[in-house]
Image: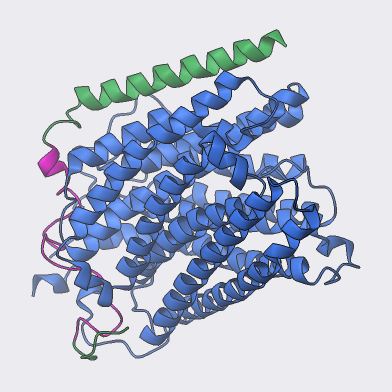
Chain colours: A blue, B green
Amino acid sequence: MSSAVTDAPSKPSLIDSISPSSVEPVEDKAERAEIDRAMRGVVLLFYGAAIAWLLIGSLFALIASLKFNIPGFVADTAAMTFGRIRPAHLNAVIYGWAAQAAIGTGLWLMARLCRVSVRHGGILYVAWALYNFGVTLGILGILSGAGTSVEYLEFPRWASVVVFAAFALIAIWTVIMFRFRKPGHVYVTQWYILAAFFWFPWLYATANLIIFYLPVQAAVQGPVNWWFGHNVLGLFFTPIGVGAAYYLIPKVIGRPVHSYYLSILGFWSLAFFYSWNGMHHLIGGPFPAWLISASIVASFMMVIPVITTGINHHFTMKGHFGALRWSPTLRFTVFGAMCYTVASLQGSSMAIRSWNQITHFTHYTIGHAHIGMYGFFTMVMFGAMYYIVPRLVEWEWPSATLIRWHFWLCAVGISVMFCALSVAGLVQGFALNDPTIPFLASTRFTLAFLWMRSVAGLMMTAGHVVFAASFALILLKAGSRRQRPTLFAAPEESAA
Amino acid sequence: MSYTYLFIAGAITFASVFAILAFYWAAKHGHLRDVENGAKVIFDEGEPIGKPTDAFPGYLTGSTTKAPH
């Protein structure tokens, strides 16, 4: 079977692609394998960098976690003090690992779903270099004491501007690809990715602008911070994670999404409700009551897209749960999708004022953050990587054993962490609200649970090391090539 | 102080207009119609409906007979 592109058009110039008067090329559709090959370099770069930051971020996490039980642990080094190592962990895993996994996955999905030859891939290489340069600068800035102390925006200005520039390039590429996509239906995943890559630069630029460059009054900075922080989760990471799941689950089991209509409903309700949620991080704070109440209402309206997505994934999987035994991608993705439902419903409950009174400022919130960003997002990203990397490298994962270890270490790790921190947080919260219990006692209650957190973190880190090893091995094309892996037959062979 | 209100009002207006335009564009170009076939666009002749496309290494081709844990 010869390639569908008979008369390959000459590569369009950047000016052509951006100019509003350019028309879509008529016969530019490309074979799936061709698209995968075109995206190979850039997606592997983003994934490789993401995994490296995951290891670094995990190390920072372990150091930070151990300090709770061993206060003197590396306390003499300024860079390792909690005030620096905790934001270093946060930023390394959010911007280093999670965002790059999101970008790599989003770019690949975008290329696949546009179904035309990839345009201007060079932009993405520049974006990758800029992005990692920016993140490195940022982390070093935090460790050297130049962090801004604004949560999720701790990178010093000179680093965040580089990160923004990189992201702007990615957003531009995405719009160009979408513009010149193969005509026809726009699959729901594409909506999610386009939206995510549009929302993130807007969020990042606005938050940085009005907190650092043209600062609003101090009391307003809190709401801006949490508008940003929450929306990064819900308008960047969630769309990429949910969008990826909407592509991966049907593709792996070979069955279309149960109710495509519901997926459209889910996307639009997410878009309309999500951005109002941010103020639920500030319940009880010195802010207008209507602002907080609006966020609580929006937090409950979020139940609509969450249940919608949950129903959709469940009924798509129904009858096919056996596939969890033989598909690594599905294991991670379904685990992630289930955590998405749990984390979101938990989040909605945490927005209730009386409930928040107990859980705010406790470990419960941290447990929630991790079941969301790790249990949901990170696990879905692992699933995506298990699907995508073989298609880029044209080789199978070398070892099922490594995959199994990776899954169980991470799944058990995050479950232990979530349970430990939730219980610790509740105990802590009730104690803090009880004036007869001294503050120190409320902290002492948590110590055993914090040991459990460190142990869980160690398991998860071990899982990451195992995954990094798998990744290195598949890049090196280790292991014997299995006989005719039907998944990766070149187009000429699939006619057989 | 006053430019903050302007900024916020402007942002909300921009966001709402953009969202409405996007939704309108989707409706106009038929993306909200024919949802059943919309779900099937990710399949093609090479990866049709009914064919799984992922497995533990060696599992689909029979070089391991046991399903991994």
Q: Nearer the viewer, residue A355 or A386?
A: A355
- Look at the picture and state if A411 lies above or below A484: above
Residue A433, percent from left and from top: 68, 45
Q: Quadrant of the C terminus of chain A?
A: bottom left
Q: Residue at x 45, y 48 (%)?
A: A346
Is A172 left or right of B58, judged from the image as shown? right
- Look at the picture and state if B42 lies above or below A282: below
- In magenta segment, residue B51: yes
Magenta: predominant secondary structure element? Answer: loop
Residue A479, percent from left and from top: 39, 89
Residue furthest to the top: B2
Q: Nearer the viewer, residue B19 or A433?
A: A433
Q: Residue at x 52, y 64 (%)?
A: A419
Q: Can the viewer see residue A150? A: yes
Q: Residue at x 23, y 55 (%)?
A: A314
Residue furthest to the left: A496
- Which residues fall within the magenta stretch? B35-61
- In magenta segment, residue A155: no
Q: Quadrant of residue A68?
A: bottom right
Residue furthest to the right: A76
Residue A125, percent from left and from top: 53, 53
Q: Nearer the viewer, residue A376 or A94?
A: A376
Q: Can the viewer see residue A12? A: no
Q: Quadrant of residue A75?
A: bottom right
Residue A234, percent from left and from top: 47, 41
Is A115 left or right of A276, judged from the image as shown? left
Q: Residue at x 41, y 36 (%)?
A: A195
